[in-house]
Image: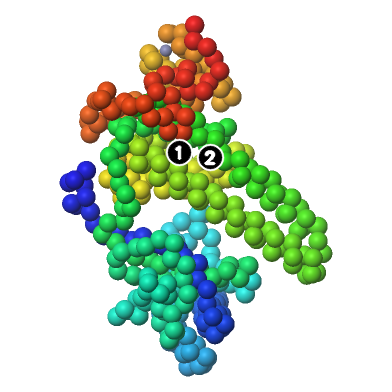
Amino acid sequence: MYLHSMQRKPTLKAFKYRIYPTDAQAVFFAKTFGCCRFVWNKMLDKKLQAYKKKERIPQDTPAKYKEEFPFLKEVDSFALCNVQLQLEKAFKDHFRNRKQFKLPKFKKKRDKQSYTTNNVHNSIRVDFEKRLLYLPKLREGVKIELHRRFEGKIKSVTVSRTNEGKYYASILVETQNPRNKVSEPKSKVCGIDLGLEYFAIVTNDFGSYKVEHPKYLRLGEERLKRLQKSFSKKQKGSKNSEKARLRLGRQHAYISNARNDFLHKLSKAIIDENQVVVVEDINVKGLLKTRLAKSISDSGWAKFLSYLKYKAEWYGRTFIQVNRFFPSSKLCHRCGHKNDDLGLNDRMWCCPKCGETHDRDVNASINLYLVGLGRSEVTPVEQALVDDRSPHGLPKKPSCDEAGSSTAKD
Ligand SMILES: [Zn+2]
């Protein structure tokens, strides 16, 4: 742990805050958003034309357009430079992987608006006392809701405006120590099986527990479906259609915030609790092609794994993704027998060799846990660590039967 923190490299971390611009500041933001969109669309158009003619794709700079369109000089020039960089990155991504990255699209006024500017010679500052954010080209600070502090050098800020007219600033900070509070892990190892019925099944030194999909997300998604239906029924361009579109946008934003919040809290809790975290290397993209697609993309597995991974890095934990061919579901965790007859729909199964009854997902998470235990960096579980606490209704003894499954052991 100590060594780990000594070797820490600076990390970039984004802090997002709600901001409340004055009318004049909102006008400046609108101008900047507009100029960014304008430059994006101009550059994109040029690039796409060359692309269609199979010519070399031109690398424009915003300076080129400033002659012809002098209003571009009024806004933050870093914002325009960043448009160029973002667009070039989008094309690069596309050429690298055409399936995953589609060609960039033209920006519309009614999309979410944003611009990114860089900190040069302290042009971006946060006054924590006065609760103000200073941005280039704005003489007065913008009122900011600083619900949490950060320390470190500000690299850039992305100002955005949602469809509903809320403003946010996402501040990218280079920080040496992004950890809030790090406690010694209570459990050495934890194995996580990601499921559809449950979001995850977790096994650590204290036993197994299931993490349900939060109910508010399910309800939120049902409401989303209803809103989508109602929006599609409205006559395009009508006042009611516009209202329905806004409602739909709000619901989308609500669900995406709520899901992120859930994934952040769960990953943080797991990283806090365990020294080594073992997960399956799920080929999410492969799975997405099947009809499971909807529920998988909804459950946010890929995001969850990426959160676990970077949090593990921050907090000095070990994150292990096992090979996706590792048969975590088919192995009996008790005797090691591999049950090749196990079908996708078998939720419970009985090991033909040792007779143990398994809950499919709990057994898988125990197998992942055992993988972690077998790793050389893991010292054997210290019994002294076992205490009486029982987070998330965690059973005290590691046992498959206590993990909430209804089968009785004979
Ligand atoms: Zn067995």
State the quadrant of the N terminus.
top left
Q: For mark 2, what is the residue?
A: 287
**Quarter, ligand 1:** top left
Q: Does any portion of residue 387 appear in the rendered image?
A: yes
Residue beneath the point at 30% across and 59% down: 11
Three-letter code for the amino acid on which mark 1 is drawn: Ile
Q: Residue at x 24, y 57 (%)?
A: 9
Toward the top, the furthest residue is 410
Please state the horizontal and vertical placement of residue 396, each as a whole percent of the image: 39, 23
Q: Are marks 2 and 1 in contact (CB under 8 Å)?
A: yes
Say left or right for 193 vs 204.
right
Instruction: Give the amino acid type for the residue marked by disc 2 in the picture.
Output: Leu
Residue 227 location, x and y as percent? Answer: 73, 54
Residue 303 sits above or below residue 253 on the image: above
Say whether residue 180 is left or right of residue 379.
Answer: right
Give residue 63's quadrant in the image. Answer: bottom left
223 and 75: which one is in front?
223
Instruction: Return the mark for residue 217.
Output: none
Work out whether 381 lies above or below 89.
above
Q: Which mark is residue 282?
A: 1
- Element marked by disc 2: helix
Q: Is residue 198 above or below residue 5?
A: above
Within 10 angstroms of label 1, few (less than 14), some, or many (20 or more) residues? some
Estimate the x, y position of residue 386 in percent, counting from the top left.
31, 26
Q: CA distance from mark 2 to mark 1?
A: 8 Å
Query: From the viewer's perspective, is residue 302 above or below residue 61?
Result: above
For label 1, the SS is loop
In terms of sequence position, does the residue under pointer 2 or pointer 1 come before the other? 1
- Queried on whether the Cβ of the residue with tag 2 lies below 8 angstroms from ligand 1, the answer reads no
Q: Residues within 10 Å of mark 2 (few under 14, many from 20)?
A: few
